[in-house]
Amino acid sequence: MSSSKGKTRTTAANLPDSVRLALRRYFPTEVSAHSAAYYALPEHLALLRLRSEAEGRMLRWNDAAEELKKDLEDLAIRMRECTSFNNAYELEILLHEGLPFPDKREELFELIKRGPVRTAYVAASFLAPYWTIQFRQWKCSRSGVVTMVNVPQEGRHSTRVANSSAKVLKKYGWRRIPSNLAQTKIQGIDLQHLPQGEVRVADVVFGDFNTPVPFPVSL
């Protein structure tokens, strides 16, 4: 790759130890993630193994989710599956009181007659001791096309979810990742879905959770 190792080490030296460990173990800078050689590396195979094992080690995450459910008893919460692209445990919270998550996404718009659908996504990494949250707003056009945008934390339910998540996840060993750290770009590496120079700490720590969702989305 065109970036020098020295430049990469200088950048990584300013990162927390846990982030540097994740980079060093699972995202070697010498080989591009866009090349076939990347998939045969011991580091990449170790990452795949860790992801596959994560589902079998979800006790701590399940306990945290159960506590959140008690804290947010009027808001529906559902777990999201670990996948081969995630580096984090995830759950989704519907920011509308007294409504369940329907089986199909389009059914949300039948339940919520006024205004857009608002959800929160919480992710806790199993590569580093950080968690993060995103708030999203979904709208459905008359033609059935759904669009999604990330929105700021605002409103009573958003604040409740953020505060409860911070309290519960701190108890289980995760701390909220600072925004400036999450947005820090890392020189010298790329990912399957991001080119060199565009990879942020959040993209490494949380994996596919931070991958942009196609916009708009057709159901």
Image: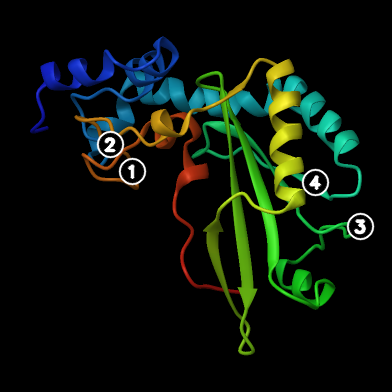
The residue singled out by tag 1 in the image is: 192
Q: Residues at badges 2 and 4 in contact (C-beta under 8 Å)?
A: no
- Placement of 73 over or under 150, stated as above or below: above
Q: Which residue is located at x 70 percent, y 24 percent?
A: 169
Mark 4, residue position: 77
Task: Identify the residue shown where x is 50% and y is 21%.
Answer: 127
Q: Which residue is mark 3?
A: 98
Q: Which mark is first along the chain, 1 or 4?
A: 4
Density class for disc 4 (Cα within 10 Å; few <14, some 14-19, many ≥20) is many
Identify the coloring.
Answer: rainbow
Which numbered marker is on residue 33?
A: 2
The mark nearer the N terminus, 2 or 1, is 2
Q: CA distance from mark 4 to mark 3?
A: 11 Å
Q: Which mark sits nearer the N-terminus, 1 or 3?
A: 3
| Label 2 Cα neighbours within 10 Å, binned few <14 / some 14-19 / many ≥20 | many
Quarter-of-image position of residue 63: top right
In this view, the residue farthest toward the front is 155
For label 2, the SS is loop
Q: Amino acid at mark 4?
A: Ile
The residues tagged by marks 1 and 3 sit, at their Cα atoms, a distance apart of 39 Å
Frontmost of labels 1 and 3 is 3
Q: Could you tell me the amino acid type at mark 2?
A: Ala
Q: Are marks 2 and 1 in contact (CB under 8 Å)?
A: yes
